[in-house]
Image: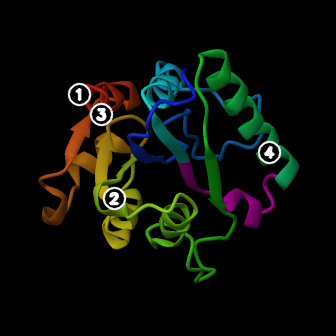
Amino acid sequence: MPQDLAKKGLVILDRDGVINQDSSAFVKTADEWLPIAGSIAAIARLSRAGFSVAIASNQSGLARGLFDNDALLAMHQKLHELVVSEGGRVDRIVVCPHGPDDDCACRKPGPGMLLELGQHFSTVLADVPVIGDSLRDLQAAAAAGARPVLVRTGNGLTTERELPTEFCDIDIFDDLAAAVTALTAD
């Protein structure tokens, strides 16, 4: 990718269910971290097209003691290596390590991680797509003033069926690859 390629903006992705297979038993190791077909190539396409790619992910498995920071770093190293092998990059990953009852500011549906990413990239979030598969991803995007986008992978089909009326006009795609195709169509 040419170094002088102008940035087209920021795209924020959820991780489990959007990039990799989700598990009700939690994804606890790099071996269990399995990309959804087409997701790695989609991330690489985004970055090659000039977008900054960030990931914001609730990781309550840390608070629950199901895995530790080293295991999480190994999962993210695998993600980075796979995306680099496709000619792309992930610019930043932020996680919420807290449990659902910890009352933190970062855990989605709260906007904390998204606001942190906006600040890091010096970006107003108004037109930033936040691509997720769960209602909490959409709620976090709305709370941060960003643009919620739903994919049908992971929990997405269930989320789509139960979508509250305030999200009836959002973009919905079959998977991350389809969402990226739409974002890079210009």
Q: Is residue 57 visible?
A: yes
For the residues bearing labels 3 and 2, Cβ distance under 8 angstroms: no
Residue at 50% from the left image edge and 62% from the top image edge: 122
Spatial distance from mark 3 to mark 2, Cα to Cα?
A: 17 Å
Q: Amino acid at mark 3?
A: Leu
**Residue 28 coordinates in the image, percent (x, y):** 75, 43
Spatial distance from mark 2 to mark 1, Cα to Cα?
A: 24 Å
The residues colored magenta run 55-67
Residue picked out by circle 3: 183
Spatial distance from mark 4 to mark 1, Cα to Cα?
A: 34 Å
In the displayed structure, does residue 123 sit left or right of residue 77?
A: left
Residue picked out by circle 4: 73
Q: Nearer the viewer, mark 4 or mark 3?
A: 3
Q: Amino acid at mark 2?
A: Leu
Work out which quarter of the rendered image holds the N terminus and state it.
Answer: top right
**Residue 45 coordinates in the image, percent (x, y):** 45, 23
Q: Nearer the viewer, mark 1 or mark 3?
A: 1
Residue picked out by circle 2: 138
Spatial distance from mark 1 to mark 3, Cα to Cα?
A: 7 Å
Q: Nearer the viewer, mark 3 or mark 2?
A: 3
Element on which disc 4 rests:
helix
